[in-house]
Amino acid sequence: MVLESALVDSERGQSRTRVIIAKKDAMGDILALLRGANAEPGRIVLDAEALASYATHGVQAVVDIGHERTLLAVSQGGQLLAARLVSMAGHAQTVAIADACSIPEADAETLKHGMEIPEGSPSGVGWSDAEPTHGNAVEPGAQRALLMAVDELIVEVRARLLAVED
């Protein structure tokens, strides 16, 4: 394991430190790949640090929904204050659509990326899409499955953000 730390802030004799732990083998593989491309990194940036640069004013949460994970970067003025990971993302939405429609995941993934979500679509956690997403109309079961999967992700994101606030 590789352990790195960085001072986040300090005030009145107290400090907050960000600690990052990574598997040494995985880091070695990344470094070898970069060296193979004649690149010598001076620093490897944590995903959340890169996301923090999108926070331009006040305290903001930048959310990156990937395929297998969702990364949250709570930032102020481009500086990372806290990072959280949700082990749920786009793949869970694909699986939900595949299950609801009894279709292969590859077909569900294609369907998801072209799906139309009508304006004001209902949600169980209080969000609605003020701007409709234009795409292909699909069976209501697929839309319902997608909305439920998105609801589940939003609940997890909110929980992580509330934990940061505490």
Image (cartoon, helix red, strand yellow):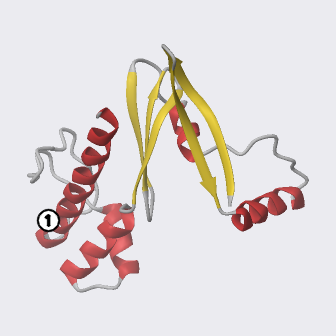
Q: Is residue 116 visible?
A: no
Task: Tell me the residue that label 1 is attached to.
Answer: 144
Which of the pair 84/66 is nearer the observer? 84
**Amino acid type of the residue tagged 1 in the rendering:** Arg
Residue shown at the point (49%, 20%) measured from the top left? 77
Residue shown at the point (77%, 66%) measured from the top left? 29
Q: Quadrant of the C terminus?
A: top left
Residue placed farthest to the top in the image? 12
Which of the pair 116/77 is nearer the observer? 77
Image side of residue 59 versus residue 140, left or right: right
Residue shown at the point (44%, 65%) measured from the top left? 68
Image side of residue 12 versus residue 127, left or right: right
Which of the pair 142/24 is nearer the observer? 24
Query: Where, by quadrant of the figure, is residue 103 drawn?
Result: bottom left
Q: Is residue 5 visible?
A: yes
Label 1: element kind: helix
Expressed as whole percent of the image width and height from the top left, the position of residue 112 reads 32, 65
Residue shown at the point (37%, 61%) measured from the top left? 89
Q: Is residue 74 above or below residue 72?
A: above
Q: Quadrant of the N terminus?
A: bottom right
Image side of residue 22 versus residue 91, left or right: right
Q: Is residue 48 above or below residue 118?
A: above
Expressed as whole percent of the image width and height from the top left, the position of residue 144 reads 14, 65
Image side of residue 132 versus residue 73, left or right: left
Expressed as whole percent of the image width and height from the top left, the position of residue 131 reads 22, 40
Expressed as whole percent of the image width and height from the top left, the position of residue 124 reads 9, 54
